[in-house]
Image (cartoon, helix red, strand yellow):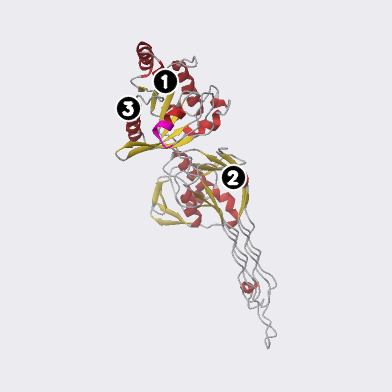
């Protein structure tokens, strides 16, 4: 069964404890401390695997634990580091905190591994605590604890084109005819219960990825039927092909069907209804010439010129070539702003025990700088070019009292805040 959601438990590795021991060698009756350090715990790492297209694997394995660091031992022996655990997810996976539902990371366009949870640092052995007044320390540092949390994984397919419409209007037939996808097809409702992806070759090295989204019904945006499960896969598409049964084979009114589906798209997301769309009038092969012209006139009078209407027959192939050419043209012209979900969850709060540092200083007249590992990590998962991402950045600066420290150094409105190569004007 296709799986596009999963709940999993993840845990980083605990740091190994430092060791307490003393040199015990012949002719060295009072050897100094030689307790070794504990090993670091393993990290929890996510990577995108382009060979995966579902979250099915997470139905069988729900717990993912990195290895613990081993304790240090005598003779300054360092404990072994714990093994990282690498979790592979398909492209389009969104990682969320299960408790709050907030987005931690969208793996849709991420090519590098994402370290979600850092393993605990190993503790220092007693060799580090010898001083002139305390030459035989009998204590060592414990390893840092593990971090654990529950995650929600959601798969939102990445495709250039999405086929939408009521059940049994011919979407599966279309994608099987124009692409390498071979979905199960039959003459009954909800034959397609999983989204199908296919690569469409338009010729001359041109092409696009098409997704057959299972039939949407009235009330889908409120969760009726499997509506929400299907609608989430349309969010990343750049162009929509709205397929209707123009022949009313099952007695449905194509004009009414379009209005209902558009309403469901709008209720789910304002951005969906703004997607470039083509209305695909299918099953015209069963109509005589006069009836065909009548149906097409109604559709074109209602929706063109804003939304083009393309007559086709998926069964015979009539109009398919023209549809693909127009679709390819619209994909090329569509805004290159495929939805990417910005981080909403403060990753730093997961690793507060790390006490990552940062440095705030005045570096010139009315110029203030902040740098350090904590800032580098924040920049690694925050999109400052997006309004929500920039707001998240501002909250990060306030929560960590970075703004407060700069004001203590004399920063005023209009001064410059420098973060590595980035510069911002401070506004109260």
The circle drawn on residue 223 is none
Asked whether disc 3 touches disc 1, contact meaning CB atoms under 8 Å apart, the reply is no
Q: Nearer the viewer, residue 57 or 152?
A: 57
Q: Main secondary structure of the magenta part?
A: helix
Task: Indicate the secondary structure of the residue bearing disc 1.
Answer: loop
Q: Which residues are magenta?
A: 176-180
Residue that numbered label 3 is attached to? 322
Q: How many marks?
A: 3
Residue that numbered label 2 is attached to? 58
Magenta span contains residue 29:
no
Q: Position of residue 270 (x, y in %)?
A: 46, 28
Residue found 69% across the figure and 83% down from its top? 30
The circle drawn on residue 283 is 1
Q: Specify the quadrant of the image occupied by residue 206.
A: top left
Taking the image as drawn, is residue 199 in sight? yes
Residue found 60% across the figure and 70% down from its top? 78
Mark 3 vs mark 2, CA separation in Å: 41 Å
Q: Position of residue 264 (x, y in %)?
A: 50, 24
Seen in the picture, residue 314 relative to 36 is either above or below; the reply is above
Q: Is residue 134 left or right of residue 263?
A: right
Q: Is residue 204 left or right of residue 410?
A: left
């Amino acid at each position: 069964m296709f799986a596009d959601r999963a709940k999993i438990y993840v845990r980083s590795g605990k740091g190994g404890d430092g060791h307490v021991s003393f040199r015990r060698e012949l002719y060295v009756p009072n050897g100094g401390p030689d307790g070794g350090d504990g090993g670091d715990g393993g990290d929890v790492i996510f990577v995108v695997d382009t060979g995966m297209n579902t979250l099915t694997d997470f139905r069988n394995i729900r717990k993912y634990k990195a290895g613990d660091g081993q304790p240090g031992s005598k003779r300054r022996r360092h404990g072994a580091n714990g093994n990282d655990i690498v979790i592979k997810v398909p492209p389009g996976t969104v990682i969320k905190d299960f408790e709050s539902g907030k987005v931690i990371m969208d793996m849709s366009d991420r090519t590098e591994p994402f370290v979600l949870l850092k393993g605990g640092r190993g503790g220092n052995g007693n060799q580090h605590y010898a001083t002139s007044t305390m030459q035989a320390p009998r204590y060592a540092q414990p390893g840092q604890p593990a971090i654990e949390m529950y995650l929600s994984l959601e798969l939102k397919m990445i495709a250039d084109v999405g086929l939408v419409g009521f059940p049994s209007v011919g979407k599966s037939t279309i994608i099987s005819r124009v692409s390498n996808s071979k979905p199960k097809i039959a003459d009954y409702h909800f034959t397609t219960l999983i989204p199908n992806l296919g690569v469409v070759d338009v010729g001359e090295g041109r092409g696009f990825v098409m997704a057959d989204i299972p039939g949407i019904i009235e009330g889908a945006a409120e969760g009726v039927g499997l509506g929400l499960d299907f609608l989430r896969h349309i969010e990343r598409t750049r162009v929509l092909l709205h397929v209707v049964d123009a022949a009313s084979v099952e007695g449905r009114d194509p004009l009414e069907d379009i209005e209902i589906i558009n309403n469901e798209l709008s209720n789910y997301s304002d951005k969906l209804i703004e997607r470039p769309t083509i209305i695909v009038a299918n099953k015209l092969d069963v109509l005589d010439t006069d009836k065909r012209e009548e149906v097409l006139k109604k559709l074109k009078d209602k929706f063109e010129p804003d939304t083009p209407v393309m007559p086709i027959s998926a069964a015979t192939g009539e109009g398919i070539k023209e549809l693909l050419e127009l679709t390819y043209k619209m994909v090329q012209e569509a805004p290159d702003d495929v939805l990417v979900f910005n981080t909403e969850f403060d990753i730093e709060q997961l690793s507060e025990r790390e006490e990552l540092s940062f440095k705030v200083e005045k570096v010139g007249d009315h110029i203030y700088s902040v740098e350090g590992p904590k800032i580098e990590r924040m920049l690694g998962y925050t999109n400052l070019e997006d309004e929500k991402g920039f707001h998240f950045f501002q909250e990060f600066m306030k929560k960590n009292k970075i703004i407060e420290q700069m004001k203590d150094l004399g920063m005023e409105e209009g001064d410059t805040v420098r973060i590595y190569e980035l510069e911002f004007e401070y506004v109260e």
